[in-house]
Structures are given as structure tokens and as C-alpha cells.
Image (cartoon, helix red, strand yellow):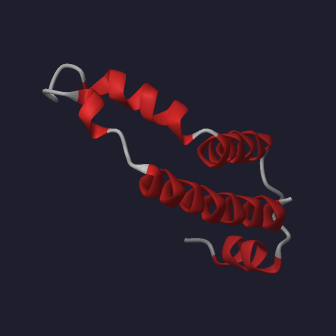
């Protein structure tokens, strides 16, 4: 690895690419969906299970499971926001 590149990255001198910003914004949208409508994500995932799970409808989380998904979504959004702010 190049020593100068490491110094620039550590000092914040390297600017992030527009592609990184777009990906982080997409991740924030996914996290927001997970917080607001985790049932929507479950419906999408249950369709993918149809070939190898006997009863995909039986895998739906309970109310506590959805609450845990929301908490995880909030943590994910905080982390993604922090990464985005650090790289702008």
C-alpha cells in the first residue's frame, strides 16, 4: 500500500466519489423502509423463499420481531449517516 494514500485517507484529504454517496443514500432509504415498513421487506423476502421453504407465510416475524427489525434499522441508519458525513 502507498504510504501517502494512507496519510490522505487518515487526514480526510481524500474526497469520496459520487458513486459512494449514491450507495450510501440508497442504504439510508433501505434503512428507512426497514424502520417504517418492515412488513414490506418480509413480503419481498417471503417470495424468494417459495422454492425451498415449505411454508413461507409461517416465517413471518411476530410483533416483537418487527420491533427488533426497527431497532436494527435505526442503528443501521445511524451508522450509514455517520459514514456519509465522514466522507463528504
Q: Choose between 36 and 20: the one closer to the eye.
A: 36
**Percent x, y for residue 23?**
68, 42
Quadrant position of residue 81: bottom right
Q: Residue at 49% across / 50% down in the picture? A: 66
User: Which residue is most to the front?
Assistant: 63
Kindly indicate the quadrant of the structure image that contains residue 50.
top left
In the rendered image, the vertical position of residue 82 relative to residue 30, given as above or below:
below
Q: Give the percent coordinates (x, y) of residue 8.
A: 78, 73
Q: Position of residue 24 (x, y in %)?
A: 70, 48
- Image location (x, y in percent) of residue 53: 16, 29
Of 33 and 87, which appears nearest the observer? 33
Q: Residue at x 85, y 70 (%)?
A: 13
Q: Residue at x 74, y 79 (%)?
A: 10
Please tell me which residue lies in front, 62 or 22.
62
Task: Please indicate whether residue 29 sits to the left or right of residue 70 in the image.
Answer: right
Instruction: Say which quadrant the N terminus sits in.
Output: bottom right
Amino acid at each position: 500500500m502507498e504510504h501517502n494514500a494512507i496519510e490522505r485517507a487518515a487526514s480526510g484529504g481524500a474526497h469520496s466519489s459520487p458513486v459512494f454517496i449514491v450507495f450510501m443514500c440508497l442504504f439510508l432509504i433501505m434503512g428507512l423502509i426497514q424502520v417504517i415498513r418492515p412488513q414490506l421487506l418480509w413480503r419481498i423476502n417471503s417470495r424468494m423463499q417459495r422454492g425451498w421453504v415449505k411454508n413461507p407465510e409461517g416465517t413471518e416475524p411476530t410483533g416483537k420481531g418487527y420491533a427488533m427489525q426497527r431497532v436494527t434499522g435505526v442503528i443501521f441508519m445511524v451508522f450509514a449517516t455517520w459514514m456519509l458525513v465522514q466522507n463528504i
